[in-house]
Image (cartoon, rainbow, N blue to C red):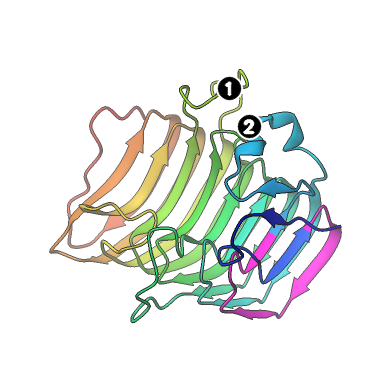
């Protein structure tokens, strides 16, 4: 049973591998190269439009979770659009010993939608572990996030990950916007919880023409509209000295950050942050 995008153009559709409403599956030692959309996408069974507008009805987001999925020893190279490895509406997933790389040099067609993130834990994913992975060249190394129409990611851990040559090291965020909400969804009741980030190496940050790249700043970490985040052990080095640099925290609480080392740049905390 598969998920598909209903769009006018197929140019922005199509995953390398998609598991849609699947349980008890292993993807082992697979290489996905030049996929049109997500290289590896673990998701639910709901058929949605490419614009995502139908997801405003949040009760439909929960249709057909994927559960108990392992993605191990996989390689992703140069996805055209969006993320290398991603989960949506998934319970119980491990992503281990995977390598994701993107080389945007010479790719004039790349815009701010592509490619986004090396490893993304998105929209209502729960109990996901990402361990011993390498990400290079994407807009963002890895993230746990949710769109405003979906519940936050919960109980997610990232450990022993190397992120190289990105615009943003990692992101923990919820994109809730009161003005965009039509369902009565309250971000205060379903914030991100139990997000653990440990032993991360971020080597090389610069402003890039990719998603998650600020026009002015390279960013080590970006934390926005979440609670209950625990970060321990992050090394940041080789930031382009010709651009600004910041670690950005916005409208978040119950955030613990320990043992962060930044070489060659000052650590800037965004004004108005609550930690």
Q: Residue 252: x percent and y percent?
A: 42, 30
Position of residue 13 relative to residue 154, above or below, is below
Residue 113 in the image, given as x and y percentages of width and height: 44, 58
Residue at left 66%, top 37%? 54
Report x, y in % for residue 225. 45, 31
* Callout 2 secondary element: helix
Residue situated in front as seen by the camera: 211 or 171? 211
Task: Using the numbered discs, state the Cα–Cα distance from disc 2 to disc 1 in whole angstroms.
Answer: 7 Å
State how many labels appear: 2
Residue positioned 25% across, 48% down in the render: 246
Report the side of 70 relative to 176 (left or right). right
Does 272 sit left or right of 150 as displayed? left
The residue identified by callout 1 is 182
Question: Image quarter for residue 57?
Answer: top right
Range covered by the magenta-colored residues = 20-41
- Above or below, 212 against 29 in this view is above
Residue at image coords 60%, 74%: 35
**Viewer-closest of 253 and 135:** 135
Number of other residues with Cα within 10 Å of mark 2, as a class: few under 14, some 14 to 19, many 20 or more = some
Q: Residue furthest front?
A: 8
Q: Residue furthest top?
A: 184
Closer to the camera in the image, 184 or 52: 52
Side of 57 where 160 appears, left or right: left
The answer to whether marks 2 and 1 mark residues whose Cβ atoms lie closer than 8 Å is yes
For the N terminus, give its image quadrant. bottom right
Quadrant showing the C terminus = top left
Q: Magenta stretch: residue 121 in it?
A: no
Residue at 16% over, 59% down? 243
Q: Is residue 223 left or right of residue 195?
A: left
Q: Is residue 27 located in the magenta-colored stretch of the structure? A: yes
In the picture of the structure, the residue carrying the numbered disc 2 is: 56
Of labels 2 and 1, earlier in sequence is 2
């Amino acid at each position: 049973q598969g998920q598909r995008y209903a769009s006018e153009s197929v140019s922005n559709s199509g995953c390398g591998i998609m598991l849609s409403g699947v349980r008890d599956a292993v993807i082992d030692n697979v290489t996905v190269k030049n996929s049109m959309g997500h290289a590896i996408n673990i998701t639910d069974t709901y058929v949605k439009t490419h614009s995502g507008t139908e997801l405003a009805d949040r009760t439909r987001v929960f249709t057909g979770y994927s559960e108990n999925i392992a993605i191990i020893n996989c390689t992703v190279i140069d996805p055209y659009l969006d993320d290398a490895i991603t989960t949506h509406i998934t319970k119980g997933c491990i992503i281990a010993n995977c390598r994701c790389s993107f080389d945007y040099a010479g790719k004039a067609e790349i815009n701010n939608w592509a490619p986004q993130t090396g490893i993304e834990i998105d929209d209502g994913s729960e109990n996901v572990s990402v361990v011993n992975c390498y990400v290079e060249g994407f807009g963002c190394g890895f993230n746990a996030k949710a769109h405003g129409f979906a519940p936050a990611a919960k109980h997610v851990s990232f450990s022993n990950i190397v992120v190289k040559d990105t615009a943003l090291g990692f992101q923990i965020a919820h994109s809730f916007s009161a003005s965009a909400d039509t369902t009565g969804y309250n971000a205060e009741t379903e914030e991100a919880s139990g997000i653990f980030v440990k032993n991360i190496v971020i080597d090389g940050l610069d402003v890039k023409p990719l998603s998650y790249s600020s026009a002015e700043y390279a960013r080590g970490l970006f934390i926005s509209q979440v609670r209950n985040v625990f970060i321990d052990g992050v090394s940041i080095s080789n930031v382009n000295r010709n651009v600004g640099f910041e670690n950005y925290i916005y409208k978040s609480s119950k955030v613990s950050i320990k043992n962060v080392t930044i070489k060659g740049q000052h650590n800037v905390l965004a004004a108005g942050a609550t930690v």
